[in-house]
Image: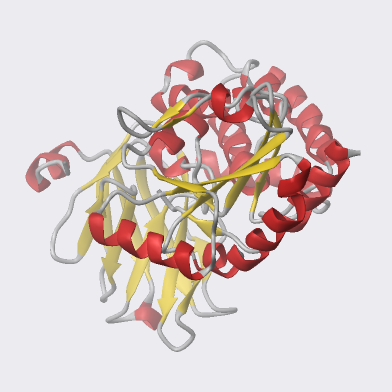
Amino acid sequence: MKKCFVIYSIFITGFVSAQSNFNLRINAPEFDKDSLFIQPLTSTGNINKIYNYDVSSDQQVIFDQKYKSVKIKINSENNVEGIIKYPQPFEISYYDPKINGGYMTKPFFMEKGDMKISISRKEHITLFLDTETPANKEYAALKKQLSDFDSKLKIFQNNDPNDIEAKHQFLQNYIRKNPNSIVAFWEIVSDFSRYQFNKSYLASLALFSKELKKNSSYTEFKKIIDIENSTGVGGNFPDVIFDKTLEISKDNFSKHTLTLVDYWSITCKPCIEDLPKLVELHKKFKEKGINFISVADENKKESMEKATEILRKNNVEWKNYFDVKKEFPKKLNASGYPLQILIDRNGKIVARKLGELDQIEDEIKKYLE
């Protein structure tokens, strides 16, 4: 499966330091003079936006407020201080120039208080918890209970919905007994980011206490889930306005049996590699009433010109729009590409796939039958 993921005001340093309620000490001698990154869970669903914490930045520690990540220049002593209102899970990653790629640790929870972890190069990059904390203790116990369910699920791939639902039936019983469990909440977030949307997440979220539902991560995640629910299979494709004269609305769908909307970017290699196959699909199905529309995630002149040239070289005959106002992420929680959405003549979404053109073709054939 080929996908590109969009792994879509820093406080004054002195103020954050004075108000800090967590201190993370990192022991990583094997990475001396290198950089490590503390980042939100690897995600396909704009999950970084729901994180809520601040870090005191200096020459050694740099906090990226937009992506909620921390870059640490490793030396003999490495302290990350800041403000965190409730436990939140992170991964630590390392970029290896030899392979032009990176490695990631298992998740751990950062929370209030002092905490120490050790990082080694064993098996690329490994994290050891030197300080036991309440959230990490609960997380380890919960993951042990969920191990049979997790073993059946594959990350960033299509899974049997029944396997996800079975896990969430267990998780819902856990939440009923532990309605304030922030760890259980983040397990739902993790499932969404790894296995994409499933309606069982809504049932799981509803079981938390009123107190937990007040935290900002819950409220922002609920917005994302509600968008996914309304724009998933069976939902209606929303009106997407690009400028005063250009938009995608029900009028675009009513004259065609099906419409395939392809969301892409010039920075996405799989998007460009798949264009010839998309052109072949268009030739194969256009006489059967299948319309194609492309939406490029570009809003700068140079990028739009490059996108136009890529489409021209690939003999793309259908309409391409530029998402200059970033409407797709707002209206559809589009967080990665290539994203293909099939819509019927009534504006109802028939299929929504991330980097799965073969499955899109199967969906078209199934619908035509």
Spot occupied by residue 103 in the image (x, y as percentages of width and height): 51, 72
In the picture provided, is 129 more to the left or to the right than 327?
right
In the picture provided, is 24 more to the left or to the right than 163?
left
Rendered position, 350 above or below 216: below
Rendered position, 204 above or below 74: above
Spot occupied by residue 363 in the image (x, y as percentages of width and height): 80, 44
- The quarter of the rendered structure image containing the N terminus is bottom right
> Farthest residue in the front direction?
287
Rendered position, 180 above or below 144: above
Residue drawn at x 64%, y 59% is 278
Q: Is residue 105 visible?
A: no
Instruction: Answer with the quarter of the image where residue 84 lies.
Output: top left
Spot occupied by residue 272 in the image (x, y as percentages of width and height): 53, 66
Q: Nearer the viewer, residue 273 or 207?
A: 273
Residue drawn at x 44%, y 53% is 7
- The quarter of the rendered structure image containing the C terminus is top right
Spot occupied by residue 147 in the image (x, y as percentages of width and height): 78, 49
Rendered position, 15 above or below 171: below
